[in-house]
């Protein structure tokens, strides 16, 4: 994807420009531009219920730049001890180190209590084919903060993922909050890639995978160390929402064949800590 290399370089230049702009803006005490830098450390990497990392610590740095509703971000995943899963296949070259770099561009428009966000995501993965998504989300600023997000893959894994999220924070002491959240996903695959496992044929020639997919509940604690620096600790519990999402079949190898061609959704406990600095 030669065109994307140019886009990636442009996005990086854009982020650097925005980061330098914030320094000037900060001196003028304007709030039009905001920049945040964060780094999370977790026991494993789960994406929409799929196991990406499972046997080693992962470090996930990111930088986000926002200006009048527009936002650009770069997010990465650094794995210290990756092992192959049904979803992620690694060679010895990629057993450790940076194995994913995602770029996101978006715009948010607010209508009273409703925030509508549309955008584009590029997934730069070393353990699977790189791909792209467009998305739109609707968030209501009411009790529970319900957020409905729709993602559509437009490149290598064509399909639609729908996620409903809920969250609420309880104030504790001097800015510290107890954060509760949960999400529930539905997936509808398109194209031959998403054909499910047929036991009779012993191959992925069945109907295309679709159905209730993954669920997640989270408990976190946010601690403002300073006006700009904060610490967030969290525990997430991931689980399948249907029997099709978790269904697996025995094989002779270490990795089983799953009904879902992209891998099963398993029961996983993810815990870790995230550090955020806001300029």
Image (cartoon, helix red, strand yellow):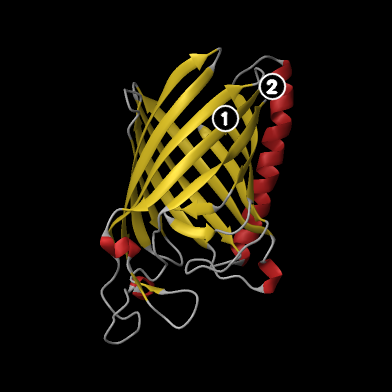
Q: Is residue 101 visible?
A: yes
Could you say which is closer to the camera, residue 103 or residue 174?
174
Answer above or below: position of 47 versus 224: below
Circle 1 residues within 10 Å: few <14, some 14–19, many ≥20: some
Tell me if mark 2 has few (under 14), some (14-19) or many (20+) residues whose alpha carbon lies within 10 angstroms of its own. Answer: some
Toward the top, the furthest residue is 174
User: Pointer 1: what residue?
Assistant: 67
Residue 48 appears in view:
no
Q: Position of residue 238 (x, y in %)?
A: 41, 49
Q: Secondary structure at mark 1?
A: strand
Marker disc for residue 259: none
The label on residue 25 is: 2
Q: CA distance from mark 2 to mark 1?
A: 11 Å
Residue nearer the viewer, 198 or 55: 55
- Quarter of the image with the C terminus in it: top right
| Residue 144: x %, y % from top left | 33, 27
């Amino acid at each position: 994807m030669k065109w994307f290399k140019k886009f990636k370089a442009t996005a990086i230049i854009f982020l650097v420009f925005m980061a330098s702009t914030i320094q000037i803006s900060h001196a003028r005490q304007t709030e039009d531009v905001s920049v945040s830098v964060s780094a999370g450390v977790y026991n494993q990497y789960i994406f929409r219920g799929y196991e990406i990392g499972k046997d080693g610590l992962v470090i996930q740095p990111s930088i986000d730049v926002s200006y009048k509703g527009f936002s650009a971000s770069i997010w990465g995943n650094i794995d210290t001890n990756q092992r192959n899963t049904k979803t992620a296949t690694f060679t010895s070259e990629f057993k450790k180190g940076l194995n994913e770099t995602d770029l996101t561009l978006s715009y948010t428009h607010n209508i009273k209590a409703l925030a509508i966000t549309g955008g584009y995501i590029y997934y730069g993965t070393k353990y699977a084919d790189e791909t792209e998504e467009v998305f739109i989300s609707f968030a209501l600023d009411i009790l529970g903060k319900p957020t409905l997000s729709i993602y559509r893959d437009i490149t290598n894994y064509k399909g639609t993922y729908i996620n409903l999220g809920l969250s609420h924070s309880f104030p504790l002491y001097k800015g510290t909050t107890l954060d509760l959240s949960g999400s529930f996903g539905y997936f509808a695959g398109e194209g031959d890639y998403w054909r499910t496992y047929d036991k009779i044929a012993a191959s992925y020639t069945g109907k295309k995978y679709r159905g209730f997919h993954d669920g997640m509940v989270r408990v976190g604690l946010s601690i403002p160390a300073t006006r700009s620096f904060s610490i967030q600790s969290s525990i997430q519990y991931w689980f399948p929402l249907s029997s099709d999402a978790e269904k697996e079949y025995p094989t002779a190898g270490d990795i089983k064949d799953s009904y879902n061609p992209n891998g099963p959704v398993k029961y996983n406990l993810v815990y870790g800590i995230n550090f955020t600095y806001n300029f």
